[in-house]
Every structure is written in C-alpha cells, then in structure tokens.
Amino acid sequence: MENLMEKIISLSKRRGFVFPTSEIYGGFSGFYDFGPLGVLLKENIKKEWRKAVVFSHDEIVEIDSAIIQNPKTWKASGHLDGFVVEIRECQKCHRRFRVDHLEDDKCPVCQGNLGQPSFFNEMFETYVGAKKDSSAIAYLRPETAQGIFLNFKNVLNTFPKELPFGIAQIGKAFRNEVSPENFIFRIREFEQMELEYFVEPKKSEEYHQKWIDERFKWYLDIGLKKENLKIFEVPKEDLAHYSKRTVEIHYNYPFLKNFGELEGMANRTDFDLKTHSKFSKVDLSLFEPKSRRRFFPYIIEPSVGIERIFLALLLDAYSEEELNSGEKRVVLKFLPKMAPIKLAVFPLLRNKPALVEKAREVYSLLKDNFLVAWDDNDNIGKRYRRQDEIGTPWCVTIDFETLENGTVTLRDRDTTKQTRHLPQEIIKIVKEKIK
Ligand code: GAP
C-alpha cells in the first residue's frame, strides 16, 4: 500500500494512538506520547505478554526495579565502556550519523564531507543529589535487564526456586539514539518487556530454542501475519559482548529494505551474574542441592520493545476497503483481544428519549464487563466508520425493535453483518471471542 507509514502516523494522531511529544514547542526528536487509545493498546500488549511469559509459567515471577540504579551497575554490565556507537559528523550541515548506517563517504542529507569517526555512548546521563559534579553522575537505564540481575538474590530469597526459573520485567528504557527514525521504531524513550530465564549451563541451548519457538508463536497469537515475520540468526561478528548466540524475530516493516528487529533472544551465558559478583563482591552463584554443586546459571533472554510490537500491530491491521454500498472505509482489523475498545453502543436516533434511555441501560450493562464506547453523534454510517477506524470489533445499536422485544443489533466489524441478540447474550459472545 502506498504511503502506508504516512497513513499510520496520521491515523495515530487523528484518533489518539500516538502524538509527537511536546508538539506545541515544535516536538522533540525521538520522543512520543501515547494518547487514550494508545494507552489501551499498550495495556493489551502487556496483558498478553504477561499471560504468556509470566502467568502461564509457575517458575517465572515479575519485578519492577528502579530506572536509575547505582552507577557501578553500568561499569559492571559493560555499558559504560561498550554501549557506544561510532559516529561521523558532516562538516557542512553538522548532522551526525552512525557509521554502520552510512552507505558512502558523503553526507546522506547534503552530500557534504564527513569528518573523522568518533565514539559516542548512548546512555543518558543525569545527576543525583544536590551536588552536580562528576561524583553525582548516574544513568537512565538503557535496558531493564540489569535491574533483574541486581535483584537475583532478593528474588531467590523470597521465592526459592529450582532451575530453570525466570524473572520478568516491564519498564521504561532510555537510549540517546544518534538518529531516531521511522516514527516509533527507533526512539529515545521506550518500554521494554524482558525475561531473564536462568538455566543449567549445559541445558542453555535447549531452553534457548524453546523460547525462540514460544515467542514466535506468541506473535501469531496476537494476530501478526506469519508472512510478515521471520527468524534471523545474528552473525557471530555482530553479537553483543555478553552473547553466545542471539536469534531475532524480524517483522516486515515497510520502511526497511529487508525486514527489521522486533524481538531479540540472546543466550547471555553466565556473563551477567559473574560480572556483578566480581564488581559487587557479592557471590551471585547458586548452590544446587541435587548435584551439590555451586555454579553460575546461564541466562536466556527474550527482550522486546513494546513500541515495535505496537507499530507492527498497526501496520498489519490497517486496511482500506470498499463496501458493497460503494462506500470506502479504513479499518483496523485487530484481533478482538487486542482492540483498544471492544464494543460501541449507539441509540439509533439521539432525539428519541425512549431509545436513548434503553441504550444507556445496555451501555451500562456492557460497561460492567468490557471497555465500551458511547456514540450518538451523526448518523449510524458515520459512527460505524469511526469505530472501524480504531478497530472496535462490534457495534451495538438500540432501535425500535429493542423497545418491543429487548433485542439489539450486533454489527461485526470485519463482515459488517448484523445479527439480533439480547444484551446478556452479547456478553457471552464477546467473552468467548476475546479469550
Ligand atoms: N537486554 C537486551 C537488550 O536490551 P536490545 O536488542 O538492545 O537488547 C531489545 O533491545 C529490544 O528492545 C529490541 O529488540 C527492540 O524491540 C527494543 N529496542 C531497542 N532499542 C530501541 C529503540 N531505540 N526504540 C525502540 N525499541 C527499541
């Protein structure tokens, strides 16, 4: 579809999914705000992730650690020395580019000459406390993972577990990306969902594969099209300093030549627990009573940014159609469980008090069970178009027949077919479909 990204960006703003941040001050590159529908879509992504990664596994718990950790964390983790990108600055327009994103020796914007390469650490710095000197420097976390490693002992002491077990976390991460790009694909403040799964070293490859398969299946379960997903094996020379093997799930983002990273799944070996033991002088090894051995478990880490999933869901769901009536519509074909709003309720006419009163009653009944919208503006056709455009799977209309026999119409977003039901039956139908 031509200009698909422009259409997604425009719809996101028009309907309240995503706004450019600080817009009245001209925006701020690499930062976005999430509107009322964006918040709901994000919540559904988190809910499905928690269901699959945390709640369906007895051996996995979730934590919520601080964004700013003791700065020694980042020395130990390797981020202070290693979280750097090579950049070159254009001598003419003074834009800066990542060397690994450059195709030739001239500035890709103004064709000016590029200066010598230099290195740039992507962690955001801040100061903690009243004295702003070098001793007060701290960092906004560039990944949530480290908060899990630092709490490894705390979690084990409160929730004793045998291997394998996992600690999950959802939270904000910050990276001072040199060139944020492609809407919410590469941004400076984003939200990660990460699992650190601790396993016996000799079983790490087996569990790695298990998580690769499980995570791939999850994307199909939330409604992404199989043909837009693929598995990518990260070449040895591109592996992060902690990784023995990394496999990524790639999505067919339209602005990339050949798919792009959605989720990464690394075998982090025993790097993290070993390095934090060394730097903190607190032994984070594990004693296993069964084998009477003390060792550092290996870690399998599925890690993803919510905004990348958010964007993939919008891209996959977006469709333009012509109805039998000849009318054109934009429709977001989310799976019902992912749709921000499940149902919209309309009185057929807003100037008939009996219809409005009955519609309010149905609205209130459905609202006790689901996220429901009320709309009595314009005609029914326009109301349907508005709900189609935000992906609401069903619309309920209260008409004159409702006043006679209590049934309402239930209109399906995808087929546009209408059927009649009692409101109580609708609760059952919808509950079954959003499981
Ligand atoms: N703890 C491992 C880790 O952070 P990563 O590959 O650097 O690994 C994991 O990041 C995931 O976080 C990526 O697969 C992507 O989904 C998301 N992510 C990373 N940088 C991002 C950015 N600048 N904007 C949006 N999402 C990002």
Image (cartoon, grey):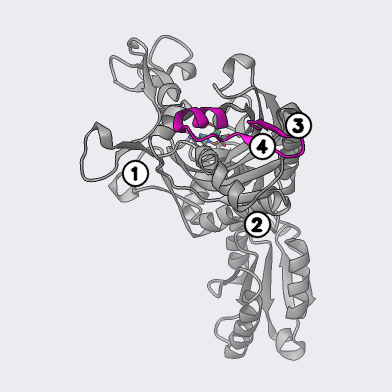
The label shown at residue 27 is 1
- Dot placed on the residue nearer the N-terminal end, 1 or 4: 1
Q: Is residue 258 above or below residue 369?
A: above
Ligand 1 closer than 8 Å to the CB at disc 2? no
Secondary structure beneath label 3: helix
Quarter of the image with the N terminus is top right
Residue ID at (65%, 57%): 327
Residue 172, labelled with which disc?
A: none
Image check: 314 left or right of 276? right
Q: Which residues are magenta?
A: 273-297
Residue displayed at 59% across by 20% down: 239
Query: Does the residue at mark 3 contact the one at mark 4 (Cβ under 8 Å)?
Result: no
Q: Nearer the viewer, mark 1 or mark 4?
A: 4
Looking at marks 1 and 2 on the same chain, the residue that comes earlier in the sequence is marked by: 1
Marker disc for residue 209: 3
Please tell me whether mark 3 or mark 1 is closer to you in this view.
3
Q: Earlier in the sequence, mark 4 or mark 2?
A: 4
Residue 124, image x, y percentages: 36, 35
Crowding around mark 4 (Cα neighbors within 10 Å: few <14, some 14 to 19, many 20+) is some
Q: For the residues marked 3 and 1, what is the alpha-carbon distance in whole angstroms?
A: 42 Å
Query: What amino acid is at disc 2?
Result: Glu
> Compared with residue 196, is residue 66 higher up or lower down, i.e. above or below?
below
Circle number at residue 287: 4
Residue bearing mark 2: 327
Q: Which structural element holds mark 1?
A: loop
